[in-house]
Amino acid sequence: MIEKNDILTGKVQSFGSDGEGVVCAEGCVFFVPYALPGEEISFKALKIKGNTGYGKIEKVIVPAKGRVQPKCPVFYTCGGCQLQHADYETQREFKREKVKNALRKIGGVEAEVSPVVACESEYGYRNKLQIPVGGDANGHTALGFYAERSHRLVPVEKCYIHPAWAEDLMAAFREYIAVSGAKGYDERTKKGLLRHLVAREIDGKLLVTVVATARKLPCEAWLTGRLQKLFPGCGVYVNVNTGDTNVIFGDRFYLLCGAARLEGRTGGIAYEAGAETFVQVNPEIREKLYERAMEACFAGGADTVIDAYSGGGLMTAMAAKRCKRAYGVELNKEASACAEALKAKNGLQNMTNICGDAAAEVPAIMDRERALWQKESAGKAVSSPHGYGEKVALILDPPRAGVARSVLQAILKSGIERFVMISCNPATLARDLGILTGTLREENGVLVKVPAAETGETSGKESGKFFDGESIDGELPDGAGEREITAYYKIESVEPFDMFPQTKHVETLVCLSKKSEKHISIDVEFGESDGQISLKKLQKELNEQKLKKKTTYKDIQKWVEENYGFKVHTAYIAEVKRDLGLPMYDAPNAVEELKRPRSHPTAEMSDAIKAALKHFEII
């Protein structure tokens, strides 16, 4: 039996999701940081729980071909990077497998993952510095990064994945700490002034933010003067964060000197970025990623693009240059204001910025697009199996937490035929893709994988399992809300981009489409003349259908319980409907291998269900 601090040997089988080596030893699976696949190592067992453990590498007995000497002297103690001990090709292969494994294990999605798009600058690529201020081992205020899986500060004087300006800025801030005597924030005692130093660089200009627990900084004039001399024209903010939280910024920003925003240019777009505005940290890969996103977005010939989680509006503007209308939806007010400035700066009259929740705004935009499509189609021959959704493309670039469930449901019901999704977190990407492709569904508030027998394929075949965010057992009801899921999405491509060399992180671009396998194309003319389809009459019929309440399985269950005094399962309702020859959705459960024989409704239950169907005028 393995005990803590035992020294073990073994061969590294593969990478773990965080870049650690996976080693099997004496029936236990160990995760060992800084071990590479193919290596034979000795390691100390630090923690064991069941048949899983964590270890610390003691010696590399047989090194992997891809092992290299780390560039940073504090690499093995600082938690900022995880892969400097691996050559670049090994890093790229790890990230490709990381994405592939996350899709399969978390989302139940099998997809071909392209090789990782490489970054020419393996070091010095970051345009943003975000470094904690706290106490070192001796209690002195220091700048540094947290050790892996801890909040123990590791002081650093230089970070190799940042350019030279970051080293100069950190040196100047250490001078300020010495001059002012300001103390770093202690998470245990909740005392101290300085919490973080944050800086962004665009086209040689800097925007610096000191995150502190109070508005007034000691020796404030000394700090602003020193930074202005070192970085002419730089803007300097104080952000006040008094919360007991690991969130970096508080709500209040105060500009001490210089410009409030930085100006830059990418993809032919002039843009602005404030202290909070999201901008990708690697300019080289950002250019490649956004260009590929635009190619994928317009591959289907979209006239309109919706950019949800649009941030400062950069991709919205790039899309606006290529289409009739582009909408940016962003919840953060400061970022939305930057997007408005970007719109004006670039003269993009076809770009609309909306500060709001994508869950509500995407359906509203689609309703607007439908009205425009109907108006533009009047008197014209139109060929479309999908309606107005076919000409609309969507861009999703959510934060690490992924796409909100309400937004996913809005997308599934939107009719949008094509969209691209960008993610910096393979785990939440896999979860969201599972929902969008139908390989995950919600049961009792928990996401579970849908058996392959139900989905037919893992690429998003139509099964219609979600209606208004509600999980339905058995076949689907005849009506379940005005916006129904007619088909899930299928994945066309998965392309990782190495936005963060030397680290475990990876950016991924996924292209999805919703194309029914069963449709016909017909040419029709809309208008009010003879031989044309009247839009007024069509709208009247649609309004009448909306006014007529659709009967759901819940309605039937409630009616039976109120009138017969017992409950009936949705599967029983489906069976009675099938026996009566009523129209049904495709039965995805028909070939499911059941864990136990399925029961059938009693004669009394069948009679009650038939009575309910008569009551609701279904039969």
Image: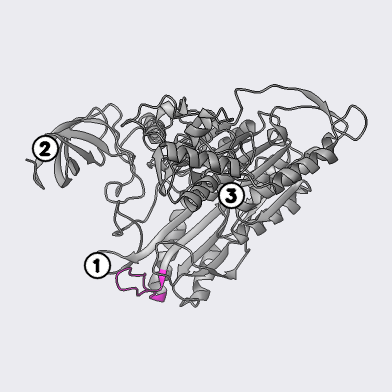
Please tell me which of labels 3 and 1 falls first in the chain.
Answer: 1
User: Which span of residues is magenta-colored?
Assistant: 180-194
What label sits on residue 400 in the rendered view? none
**Amino acid type of the residue that numbered disc 2 sits on in the rendered structure:** Leu
Residue 375 at x, y = what percent?
83, 40
Q: Main secondary structure of the magenta part?
A: loop
Magenta span contains residue 146: no
Numbered disc 2: secondary structure = strand
Find residue 8 and name its label. 2
Q: Residue 138 got which mark?
A: 1
- Assign the N terminus to one quadrant of the image: top left
Q: Give the residue displayed 62% in from the left and 33% down from the top.
A: 418
421 shown above or below 208? above
Residue 545, above or below 312 = above
Q: CA distance from mark 3 to mark 2?
A: 48 Å
Q: Which residue is mark 3?
A: 309
Residue 110 in view here: no
Residue projecting furthest to the left: 1
Residue 187 within the segment the image draws in magenta:
yes
Disc 3 vs disc 1: Cβ atoms closer than 8 Å?
no
Specify the quadrant of the image occupied by residue 538: top right
Is 383 on the left-hand or right-hand side of 95?
Answer: right
Q: Secondary structure at mark 3?
A: loop
Q: Nearer the viewer, residue 128 or 493?
A: 493
The disc labelled 1 sits on which kind of residue? Asn
Q: Is residue 203 above or below residue 599?
A: below
Is 256 positioned to the left or the right of 306 in the image?
A: left
| Viewer-nearest of discs 3 and 2 | 3
Expressed as whole percent of the image width and height from the top left, the position of residue 294 reads 64, 35
Hey, what amino acid is under mark 3?
A: Tyr
The mark nearer the N terminus, 3 or 2, is 2
Q: Position of residue 147 (x, y in %)?
A: 30, 54
